[in-house]
Image (tube, helix red, strand yellow):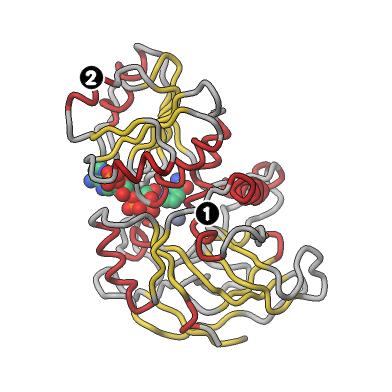
Amino acid sequence: MTTVSAYAATSANEPLTKTTITRRDVGPHDVAFDIHFAGICHSDIHTVKAEWGEPNYPVVPGHEIAGVVTEVGTDVTKFKVGDRVGVGCFVDSCRECDQCRAGEEQYCTNPGMIGTYNSVGRDGEPTQGGYSGAIVVDENYVLRIPDSLPLDAAAPLLCAGITLYSPLRHWNAGPGTSVAVIGLGGLGHVGVKLAHAMGAKVTVLSQSLKKMEDGLRLGADEYYATSDPGTFETLAGSFDLILNTVSANLDLNAYLKLLKLDGTLVELGMPERPMSVAASALVFARRSLAGSLIGGIAETQEMLDFCAEHDVRPEIEVITPDYINEAYQRVLASDVRYRFVIDTATLRG
Ligand code: NAP
Ligand code: ZN
Ligand code: ZN
């Protein structure tokens, strides 16, 4: 076992503080790597604030992890020391259920994927995430970061990137399709870039017009404020696909009416409380309401390669670990442009 520095939450109400955690010895199939950067996802905040149930404190969050390999196990074939790698939201799964066999490990049913943090690993120990100096992960759950992507900007792709890429592909976004993204935060801004790179027409639906210039620069064709009731009249029946990235409850019925016949609204945000849906918002235009969870390992690699090829890079604000608590406050205030990424240098070796 090795000891590494980390930032952990010890309760829902206390700030995260510096601590140490242990990482397991490198097994035959393991890759050990130094973490260089870790993105701050809103899911980290939901988890440590116990909005999805009481987590197993202490929790070291972080599932947008990028770094460089320092050691590989004797049977590792996919990676070598010095490789640039990443880890996303899960570090293992059963590998045997239909979903795992189909490369949809995030939907593992036996009993479920092993989360990068706040889960229990195969060794029976709690998993701890990327706000730390180093990590050890089975090679089958490690991604290769293409050379042209800087490690800091690549980190948010491991969760925000794949969470938007997967539904855009699944619902066939591309030339001739009209896609709306609700919420221009960490997930949303990558969604705008990806949908634009895939050739879709992209509309941002944000609370205000404050970030409009950014949205258009990121690749949006149109930008509307949802605080203006006129938006919902103007855009009625406009979209093939709406991706909802908002971390809070919305009036889904108002947004469903923005879909065309047969359109789909995909829930990506995971607010604390349930939301209600009127049957009429679906029935009158054969609309669908769906959800989507991150993406499998193969699709995550495909997404990273797509981002390298199309120069899709998250817009980031790099911070030091002692700024994590302030960054959380700014995410909660929708004051993030557009992903905080922790430079973990002070947590390494
Ligand atoms: P984020 O950076 O905070 O972005 C969320 C955006 O939603 C904000 O920037 C804001 O955009 C909008 N918003 C926030 N509060 C709002 C409110 N009360 N009403 C309307 N709009 C509001 O968060 P994120 O990291 O992108 O994550 C977003 C959500 O996705 C979280 O719930 C997270 O847990 C979830 N998530 C899901 C998956 C998945 O696999 N499904 C993966 C990762 C994260 P504007 O300022 O533009 O309005
Ligand atoms: Zn996330
Ligand atoms: Zn499985």
Viewer can see residue 273: no
Q: Where is residue 213 in the image (x, y as percent from the top left)?
A: 31, 43
Looking at the rendered structure, the kind of residue marked 2 is Glu
On the rendered structure, is 165 left or right of 78? left
Please state, as top left, top right, bottom left or bottom right, where the C terminus lies in the image.
bottom right
Looking at the rendered structure, the kind of residue marked 1 is Leu
Direction top: furthest residue: 284
On the rendered structure, is 310 left or right of 263? right
- The disc at residue 157 is 1
- The disc at residue 233 is 2
| Residue at mark 2: C-beta within 8 A of ligand 1 | no
Viewer can see residue 41: yes
Q: Where is residue 141 in the image (x, y as percent from the top left)?
A: 65, 60
The quadrant in which residue 142 appears is bottom right
> Relative to residue 201, is residue 120 depicted above or below?
below
Q: Label 2 crowding class (10 Å Cα cut-off): few <14, some 14-19, many 20+?
A: few
